Amino acid sequence: MCRNIRPLFNFDPPVTEEEIRAAALQFVRKISACNAPNAGNREAFERAVDEIADVSRRLLFSLKTNAPAKNRAVEAAKAKARVAKRFAS
């Protein structure tokens, strides 16, 4: 039902609003065990996504590090190589 939530901190280019909201949506889907809420729960579901996105945004923009920012393309290539190795027959 739900993909893994990916790390969003310390990347170049920085995290976008869409990525933060997508992570919040994945989190709410996971903990609610609900991929798409019914009409009666839609408002609560959307409110939870909005609140978690707000908290996540504040967290991500307040964190500090001395480590160099990770390159998204390089990290994606590493992840792809790990998957290929894992599923190699």
Image (cartoon, rainbow, N blue to C red):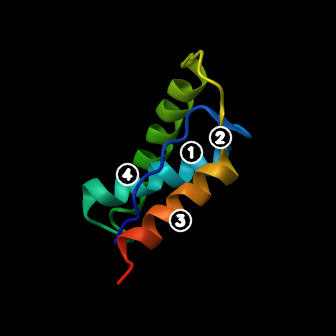
Q: Could you tell which of marks 3 and 1 lies nearer the N-terminus?
A: 1
Q: Could you tell which of marks 4 and 1 lies nearer the N-terminus?
A: 1
Q: CA distance from mark 4 to mark 2?
A: 17 Å
- Helix, strand or loop at mark 2: loop
Q: Could you tell which of marks 2 and 1 lies nearer the N-terminus?
A: 2
Q: Which residue is mark 3?
A: 80
Q: Residues within 10 Å of mark 4 (few under 14, many from 20)?
A: many
Depth-wise, is mark 2 or mark 3 nearer the camera? 3
Q: Which residue is mark 1?
A: 20
Residue type indicated by callout 3? Lys
- Helix, strand or loop at mark 4: helix
Does residue 69 sit above or below 8 in this rendering?
Answer: above
Q: Are marks 2 and 1 in contact (CB under 8 Å)?
A: yes
Q: Could you tell which of marks 2 and 3 lies nearer the N-terminus?
A: 2
Residue shown at the point (51%, 64%) measured from the top left = 81
Residue type indicated by callout 1? Ile
Residue shown at the point (50%, 25%) measured from the top left = 59
- Of the numbered discs in the image, which one, if any, rests on residue 67? none
- Helix, strand or loop at mark 3: helix
Q: Are marks 2 and 3 in contact (CB under 8 Å)?
A: no
Does residue 76 sit above or below 10 in this rendering?
Answer: below
Residue shown at the point (30%, 58%) measured from the top left = 30
Is residue 17 left or right of 47 when viewed as pictured? right
Q: Which residue is mark 4?
A: 27
Indicate the position of residue 69 as horizontal and vertical percent values: 66, 31
Indicate the position of residue 35 as horizontal and vertical percent values: 36, 70
Q: Residues within 10 Å of mark 3 (few under 14, many from 20)?
A: few
Location of residue 37 (image quadrant)? bottom left
Numbered disc total: 4
Q: CA distance from mark 2 to mark 1?
A: 7 Å
Q: Are marks 3 and 1 in contact (CB under 8 Å)?
A: no
Q: Are marks 4 and 1 in contact (CB under 8 Å)?
A: no
